Image (cartoon, rainbow, N blue to C red):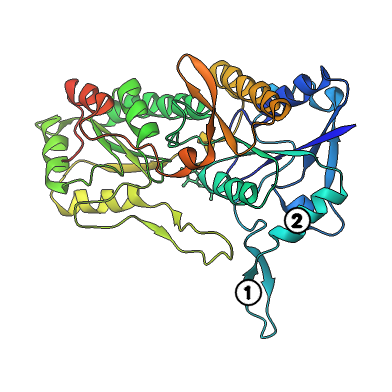
Amino acid sequence: MKRVMVLTGGGDCPGLNAVIRAIVKRAAQEKDWEVIGCIESFNGVLREPTEIVVLDEKTVAGIHVQGGTIIGTVNKGGPFAWPVKDNDGNWTTVDRSDEMIRKLGYLGIDAVINIGGDGSQRISQKLFQKGLNIIGVPKTIDNDLSATDFTFGFQTAVQIATEAVDKLVTTAASHNRVFILEVMGRDAGWIASHAAIAGGADVCLIPEIPYDIEKVVEKVNSRYHKGRGFCNIVVAEGAAPKGGHTTGEDMHEIGNEHIRLGGIGEKLKIDLVKAGVEADVRVTVLGHLQRGGIPMAYDRVLATEFGVKAFEMVLDGQFGHMVAYRHPKIIAVPFEEAITHPKLVKPKGDIVRTAKGIGIEFGD
Ligand code: F6P
């Protein structure tokens, strides 16, 4: 029997379970393959006792409809940065990658499928360079991986954000208010720009376009006549004013390279009021609601395509590659191509041109 180990890393994302199910179902068509799930990314193999589970067709029945991941996930630690306490009681990290590769050998693992975002695929690349038979499946609601046209989970996140805009529009109109909706998007404004267009927002602020508060104030005020009117603003968590910086908190989490973003909505509210906006300004932070729950049909289909392709890449020995969607094909791309640069919203690209074409203000 040959064994492929599957794991999910980084933030969860609607569609992860559909990928897992597709891998298991496709593998079941080959009589000599067994699928093993590693609990919480690579941690399941690194822990003592080892936490791995056999995934068969019974285990994965119906899970394509469920959000989250049945094998759990983490967004810190991993084989190259395993947190440990040193002799003085301070946390530090150690490289356990060689030990982990040896352990995978003892466990009879022939190949690994790592489902995760850019951070996870950087780990995949390093493990591949050390000789591990590994394949990547891209995952992020932010849709900011350059190798693939779309990642599963993005459409679901956009739908959730759009429904939030829809709801805020009616309450904003009823109360003559300014509503700021803070959505996810660490480096890229894909969710914000799509939700702003789909929901009919008036202002959209994204990480790729630092905003001038005066331009935003001008747009807000233009929406009011004799105190009546309303304005809806969608802001990505990674947006920042011109000459300013992102808003968030460094949680000092060992093994986590990111600061935790959040709070730009509140900051914007304060700045708008300071800059003379007289209307009542309210803030809604959508947060993790964008990542949870049932994946939309589009994301289930894309996730299933990725899962089937990933297992077929294992069969073909296409290690060192990540699955990608380049319309109209599902293809394999080398890890280097997948992780070198993020896919950002182009300030002069189609999505911004479209949004500006219907009067959405970006503050530039
Ligand atoms: O990468 C996807 C994402 O949703 C980002 O937009 C966000 O900054 C991050 O995950 C938050 O992740 P967590 O709350 O799990 O730290």
| Viewer-proximal residue among 350 and 261 | 350
- Residue drawn at 46 percent across, 24 percent down: 159
Which image quadrant is residue 243 in? bottom left
Judged left or right of residue 116, residue 178 is left
Residue 205 marker: none
- In the picture of the structure, the residue carrying the numbered disc 2 is 100
What x and y, as percent, mark residue 350? 25, 23
In front: label 2 or label 1: 2
Task: Identify the residue at horizontal 66%, vertical 86% (top origin).
Answer: 88
Placement of the C terminus among the 4 image quadrants: top left
Rendering coords of residue 129 (x, y %) = 61, 50
Q: Is residue 199 visible?
A: yes
Q: Position of residue 92 (x, y in %)?
A: 62, 73
In which quadrant of the rendered view does residue 352 lie? top left
Q: The N terminus appears in which quarter of the rendering? A: top right
Mark 2 crowdedness (10 Å alpha carbons): few <14, some 14-19, many ≥20? many
Q: Residue furthest top?
A: 328
| Residue for badge 1 | 91
Crowd tier of the residue under label 1, counting other residues whose Cα lies within 10 Å: few below 14, some 14–19, many 20 or above: few
**Can residue 177 be seen in the rendering of this structure?**
no
Given the current orientation, which residue lies at the most extreme bottom position? 88
Residue shown at the point (41%, 46%) measured from the top left: 186
